Image: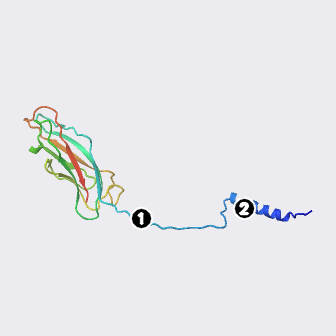
Amino acid sequence: MRYHSGHSYWKKAGLTALASVLAINGVPPAHSDVVVVTQTLQAQLAAVGKVSAPASLTLTPTGTVFSPFAGSLTLRYRVRSAPSGSVSTLTVQATGNFSPSGGPNISNNGLTYTCASATLGTPCSGNQTMSLASQTSVTAIPAAACTGGGAPCSTADPNSVNLNVTLDNDPAYKAGSYTAAITFTISVL
């Protein structure tokens, strides 16, 4: 009969117990590997703009008989213009005359506006005539301009400009309800 020494058994059991204690206490194994990878990121940010306006504007009489109709709206816009180059613009254009026929006629220069309180850029100056043929200025936005966040950008987000619209009240217009569409465009360079 052979007799086995318990020494080898206790040595193996002790090592197994030690490994279990180390694993439970979060001690990493003696062997580790660290790999570092560096990646270069590149982004091309273009000049860009966005403009929004209320869905509609109701023009109301300003006072006495045959006084002009008037209304105000606030345009909201965001912009990032190029660091150099031309001035970017926010413009307006009438896209159709008032309908139905017999009412106000934009072609006769009866629809005008003024601009005020631009939070970024320079609002139009003086009385402007809305046109069916071309865009007219609302706000000029300089190079290297941007919306929000503070210097070097404006502190406002979004930016805004007020447009005060006036429609003449010619006695030749037929009584009735009339509508016309205008389009705002922001061109950022």
What is the distance, in whole Å, between disc 1 and disc 2 at their CAs? 43 Å
Q: Residue furthest front?
A: 1
Q: How many marks?
A: 2
Identify the image quadrant of residue 103: top left
User: Nearer the N terminus, badge 1 or badge 2?
Assistant: 2
Give whichever of 164, 101 is nearer the camera: 101
Give whichever of 82, 68 is nearer the camera: 82
Q: Residue furthest right?
A: 1
Q: Is residue 173 above or below residue 47?
A: above
Q: Is residue 162 left or right of residue 108?
A: right
For mark 2, what is the residue? 19
In the rendered image, residue 115, in percent from the top left (x then y), is placed at: 20, 49
Looking at the rendering, in which quadrant would you find the N terminus?
A: bottom right
Residue positioned 21% across, 47% down in the render: 183
Verify CB contact (< 8 Å) between mark 1 and mark 2: no
In the rendered image, residue 13, in percent from the top left (x then y), is placed at: 79, 61
Q: Is residue 174 left or right of residue 45?
A: left
Q: Which mark is residue 41?
A: 1
In the rendered image, residue 116, in percent from the top left (x then y), is placed at: 22, 49
In the rendered image, residue 58, in percent from the top left (x then y), is placed at: 21, 37
User: Helix, strand or loop at disc 2?
Assistant: helix
Identify the image quadrant of residue 145: bottom left
Residue type marked 1: Leu
Q: Is residue 92 above or below residue 80?
A: above
Residue positioned 42% across, 64% down in the render: 41
Residue positioned 29% across, 54% down in the render: 49
Estimate how packed mark 1 is, as few (under 14), some (14 to 19) or many (20 or more) residues with alpha carbons within 10 Å. few
Residue type marked 2: Ala
